[in-house]
Image (cartoon, rainbow, N blue to C red):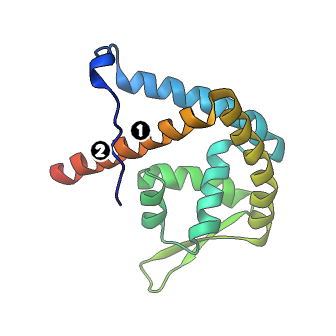
Amino acid sequence: MLIPKLDLPTAELPAPKGCSSLKLRQLSRRVSQLFDAEVGSAGLKTTQYSLLSHVVRLGPVRPGQLAAAMEMDASTLTRNLQPLIAQGWVQVGAGDDGRSRLVEVTPAGRAKQALARKAWQRAQQGFNERMGAERVARLHAAIDECLGLLHEAVDTIE
């Protein structure tokens, strides 16, 4: 995947202060609160909507592929799938052979995701309006660039 480099005038930026992990978690929590307020009207948390949407888009999909697509580890995926399975929105069944599994959406899950998509669209539109479309585009580009750099770092460690 080609990730665009951000051309920010580094001379104008102050040196980073504080913990990057903390700042990112603070931002993530605040954005989640905004999205949860809308997506919750459909009976889902934003994290559940995201997972359900990935299963709709990718499924049937092996758990490892789903975890990789969502940038999460396998144990987190397993834990996050449990409420969706319990509600009957997702099922995990046998894969191509006896050792593999496949995650797929059920008809009820597809209907729930479609309902929640409207709420998510309201949340995204509200976020874009509050932040400004240009700032959101820059944020997405910075996140994509950082993810690419961090993937490179992980690849060299492994």
**Image quadrant of residue 17?**
top left
Q: Nearer the viewer, residue 150 or 71?
A: 150
Q: Between label 1 and label 2, give the one nearer the viewer.
A: 1
Q: Residues within 10 Å of mark 1 (few under 14, many from 20)?
A: some
Q: Earlier in the sequence, mark 1 or mark 2?
A: 1
Residue at 50% over, 54% down: 77
Gap between marks 1 and 2, in whole Å?
12 Å
Residue 142 location in percent, x, y? 41, 38
Residue 158 shows up from this direction: no
Residue 55 location in percent, x, y? 60, 65
Residue 33 location in percent, x, y? 67, 29
Residue at 59% over, 61% down: 54
Above or below — where is 63 with respect to 97? above
Residue 158 location in percent, x, y? 18, 54
Residue 14 shows up from this direction: yes
User: In the rendered structure, are the residues bearing label 1 and label 2 in contact, judged by CB atoms less than 8 Å apart?
Assistant: no
Q: Is residue 29 left or right of residue 25?
A: right
Under tag 2, what secondary structure?
A: helix
Q: What is the number of callouts on the image?
A: 2
Q: Residues within 10 Å of mark 2 (few under 14, many from 20)?
A: few
Q: Which quadrant is home to the N terminus?
A: bottom left
Above or below — where is 130 with respect to 125? above
Under tag 1, what secondary structure?
A: helix
Q: Which amino acid type is shown beneath numbered disc 1?
A: Ala
Above or below — where is 66 with respect to 47? below
Q: Nearer the viewer, residue 26 or 121?
A: 121
Q: Is residue 2 left or right of residue 29?
A: left
Q: Which amino acid type is shown beneath numbered disc 2?
A: Leu
Residue to which mark 2 is pinned: 150
Residue at 65% over, 67% down: 56
Residue 142 badge: 1
Q: Nearer the viewer, residue 137 or 124?
A: 137
